[in-house]
Amino acid sequence: MKNGCVIGMGAIGPVHAAALQARGSLYGICDNQQERLDRFQTEDTALHRFMVFEEVLKDPAIEVVHICTPHFLHADMTRAALAAGKDVVLEKPAAMNAEEFEDLQRYASKSAGRVCVMLQNRTNPSVVKMKELLEYGCDMGKLLGITGFLTWCRDAEYYAQDTWRGKWATEGGGLLINQAIHTLDLLGYLGGKIVSVQGSISNKTLQGVIEVEDTADAIMETEDGLRLCFYATNGCRYSRPMYLEAQLERGVLRYADNRLYQITDENCRVLAYDRPDCPGKVCWGGGHRTVIEDFYRYLETGSGDYLALEDAAPVMETLFAFYQSAKINQKICI
């Protein structure tokens, strides 16, 4: 059984810690705020609590490091963990810009350690079923396009909780790089390689609060000529699970409220339902535990597969092209 340590016990770190605890792999947690370490309650008296990242790297008992820290620390901490001989579970985003991501890929390719990226929505049962139907065929004809929406609430109170949020230098962006990155990922994962992006970003509800965007939209095209339509905002009063709709010749596959529906003129059927099995908000989905379990199984037995750093390359490429398109107000070809 591999020993893991979670770095960063803010919002998402406790979800990683709970997943490790459930499988008996939680060796330690690390945060530079004592209150966050104390907030994680466990009956495990042997749990190690660190306040210094470097101390984690020096501990030979720790084999896997989970990077759940602010965005601007992700790439540097991943490199440091790999240099210390650790394997890494890396929360999104893998990097804050294209150059940083390319540098991380080069470094990781020369390392003995493995990097697993947290693109957990790919493992949701509804998404797995949708991918299967789109790849291997269903009775609704040719795929014509996919629409993706995300409507969440991230208000001034949310941004006041951590000083790194809402700034280009430390978050790398806003809605797109943080909340909506999973929606972008699934559009490409389900629709195929994205070759162009025409996008726009704006700050509609948080002027004077954040530097970055709270709303974004785009039209994207794939190499097979599919049109992907995207809209996301943090300006809603309530956060809902993402909405995806694949339009086919004789109906649609609709992913809404954590369910996959097959809809035709004749009927509507529920094909799959996601049941989150780990703590966290319903709108996050429940795939963190699946991604973590797959990675640890691979590390411990060599069997199965996991979401590797290269699996994040398409969405990172799309993300940075989106920002560039919005900046110059032109279509970007990838």
Image: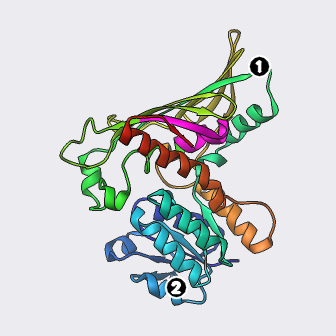
User: Where residue 283 sits: x, y (%)?
Assistant: 48, 43
Task: Report how far apart the C-alphas of labels 1 and 2 lie in the structure.
Answer: 53 Å
Which numbered disc covers residue 141? 1
Image spot of residue 238 (x, y percent): 36, 36
Please tell me whether residue 331 belongs to the stretch shown in magenta: no
Quadrant where the C terminus sits is top right
Would you place residue 18 above or below residue 201 in this image? below
Image x and y of residue 294, in percent: 70, 61
The numbered dot on residue 57 is 2
Q: Residues within 10 Å of mark 2 (few under 14, many from 20)?
A: many
Q: Where is residue 22 drawn, in percent x and y? A: 61, 66
Q: Is residue 190 magenta?
A: yes
Residue found at x 79% / y 25% = 138
Q: Amino acid at mark 2?
A: Leu
Q: Are marks 1 and 2 in contact (CB under 8 Å)?
A: no
Q: Which residues are magenta?
A: 184-199
Is residue 277 at all visible to an observer of this figure? no
Q: Please, what secondary structure does the residue beneath circle 1 have?
A: loop
Name the mark nearer the viewer: 1 or 2: 1
Q: Quadrant of residue 143?
A: top right
Give residue 65's quadrant in the image: bottom right
Q: Residue at x 56, y 55 (%)?
A: 278
Above/below status of 61 relative to 192: below
Q: Amino acid under label 1?
A: Gly
Q: Is residue 213 above or below residue 99?
A: above
> Which residue is rendered at x = 45% and y = 85% of the image?
54
